[in-house]
Image (cartoon, grey):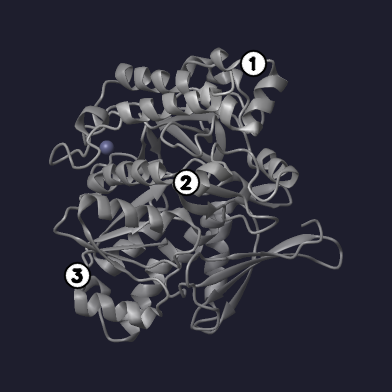
């Protein structure tokens, strides 16, 4: 049969449409899509299974990457029809996509978006944020735009954003998914927005002061930077019109020190999008009104009718149970162009299906997220996240916002770490050293620089410089 790619695509688009409830407007005041956001656990699994059974034939017929993988594993698409079947399918990681891209540049074959679709219903191309090698790109269709806007609208609605709000988006508007996803969701919700791309911090501070947006969308490091720019201009961010900080692109909600600092600087609530380019087109995780209300750590919902979230052991890559720490794996069930099957997103967390005070039934990541496992710094066998170092710096009063971690190899071949921080008092070095040792269980040299020495963050902070010979 020669029309199999088309038939399986039509079936996939049908099932996507069937479960896209409340596509155009909020179904209730508290929930954008009440029957999905509050579906029973059994119903959520039934929806996932209904989508999976149609997804696997679609992938097999429309992605050479997936067809090769099914064939190599000796599996037929019909072998994976339910969530319980998923462990048969080893997780897909970035390295496999990179190899596929190298063999089939410039797009690779790991998506279901081909040149014919790009030429007829293409929408936008996004790129992974990896800093080395050829970019892994993801082309999306006009249908993805609608699905993306809808799913993100559900999350923005959960944050409390309504048409009476206006949102200032501070982003570069490059091929990074986060800001675009917010932009299109706001349009679908009828919420006004001020695009703040391509402007200086001073110009953005002026926009806030003059036009009074109620929410700010940017990376957490930029939210910190912009608060300082406002203060330098004699404007108090805490007294500004901003009541909500919608951040993404870097971890923040789960970092108590960073979250408290931003919330107090802006006198605003911080909410977060969690996700990645590969299993877009939209966020996977989002804060709800109960996320930071305790007891216990902050939590992040993962949207389960449109994605299947699992955790796997970092070494065996086998699924771990609820309450056990593992790395995030996502099967995306809401995309025409990039519906990946068990992609290793790679953040450590634990999951809970315990009921949430907000009324949503979808699983939550406890303590939110601290960063991708491939960002872990390994110093002489001690592993730590860059954000743990950030928490240490934030714990020392008087430290500047910017800091840098330098990893280097000494002449005797020993790998060492130096934290470069800004402080008016050189004696702060000992305090920073103690905080780092307490959090990361590693010794670190601290270099104190005069305030204002380090370059200011403009989008995503680049805090770690690794010059070690071992790399
Ligand atoms: Zn909730």
Q: Mark 2 falls on what kind of element? A: helix
Question: Which residue is situated farthest in the top direction here?
Answer: 79
Q: Quadrant of residue 51?
A: top left
Considering every residue shown, the one lying at the far front of the view is: 2
Comparing 286 with 143, the one in front is 143
| Disc nearest the viewer among 3 and 2 | 2
- Residue on which the image places disc 2: 120
| Mark sitting on residue 198 | none
Task: Residue under label 3, please give it.
Answer: 241
**Cα separation between marks 3 and 1:** 56 Å
Q: Identify the residue under disc 1.
A: 75
Q: Residues within 10 Å of mark 1 (few under 14, many from 20)?
A: some
Task: Classify residue 258 by image quadrant.
Answer: bottom left
Question: In terms of sequence position, does the residue under pointer 2 or pointer 1 come before the other?
Answer: 1
Asked if the residues shown at circle 3 and circle 1 are in contact, with their CB atoms under 8 angstroms apart, the answer is no
Q: Residue at x 69, y 15 (%)?
A: 74
Which percent across, then down, holds residue 455? 54, 78
């Amino acid at each position: 049969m020669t029309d199999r790619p088309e038939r399986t695509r039509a079936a996939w688009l049908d099932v996507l449409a069937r479960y896209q409830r409340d596509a155009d407007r909020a179904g209730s005041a508290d929930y954008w899509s009440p029957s999905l956001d509050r579906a029973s656990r059994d119903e959520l699994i039934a929806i996932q299974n209904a989508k999976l059974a149609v997804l696997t034939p679609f992938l097999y017929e429309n992605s050479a990457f997936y067809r090769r993988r099914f064939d190599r594993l000796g599996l037929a698409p019909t072998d994976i029809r339910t969530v319980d079947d998923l462990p048969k399918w080893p997780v897909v990681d970035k390295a496999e996509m990179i190899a596929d891209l190298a063999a089939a540049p410039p797009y690779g074959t790991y998506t279901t978006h081909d040149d014919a679709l790009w030429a007829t219903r293409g929408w936008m191309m996004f790129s992974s944020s990896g800093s080395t090698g050829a970019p892994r790109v993801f082309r999306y269709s006009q249908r993805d735009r609608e699905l993306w806007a809808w799913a993100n609208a559900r999350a923005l609605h959960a944050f409390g954003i309504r048409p009476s709000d206006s949102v200032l988006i501070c982003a570069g508007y490059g091929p990074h998914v986060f800001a675009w996803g917010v932009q299109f969701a706001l349009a679908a919700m009828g919420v006004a927005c001020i695009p703040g791309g391509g402007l200086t911090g001073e110009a953005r501070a002026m926009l806030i002061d003059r036009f009074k947006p109620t929410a700010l969308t940017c990376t957490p490091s930029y939210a910190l930077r912009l608060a300082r720019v406002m203060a330098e201009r004699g404007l108090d961010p805490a007294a500004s019109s901003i009541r909500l900080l919608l951040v993404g692109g870097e971890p923040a909600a789960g970092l108590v020190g960073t979250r408290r600092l931003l919330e107090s600087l802006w006198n605003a609530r911080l909410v977060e999008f969690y996700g990645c380019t590969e299993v877009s087109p939209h966020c996977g995780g989002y804060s709800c009104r109960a996320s930071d209300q305790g007891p216990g750590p902050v939590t992040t919902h993962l949207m389960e009718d449109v994605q299947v979230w699992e955790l796997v052991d970092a070494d065996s890559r086998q699924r771990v149970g609820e309450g056990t720490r593992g790395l995030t794996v996502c099967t995306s069930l809401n995309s025409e162009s990039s519906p990946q099957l068990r992609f290793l997103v790679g953040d450590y967390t634990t999951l809970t299906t315990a009921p949430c005070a907000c009324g949503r039934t979808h699983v939550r990541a406890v303590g939110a997220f601290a960063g991708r496992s491939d960002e872990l710094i390994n110093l002489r066998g001690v592993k730590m996240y860059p954000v743990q170092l950030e928490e240490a710096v934030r714990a020392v009063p008087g430290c500047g916002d910017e800091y840098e971690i330098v990893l280097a190899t000494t002449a005797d071949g020993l790998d060492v770490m130096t934290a470069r921080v800004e402080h008016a008092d050189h004696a702060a070095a000992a305090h920073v050293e103690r905080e780092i040792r307490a959090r990361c269980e590693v010794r670190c040299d601290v270099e104190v620089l005069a305030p204002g020495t380090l370059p200011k963050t403009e989008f995503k902070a680049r805090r770690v410089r690794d010059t070690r010979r071992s790399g």
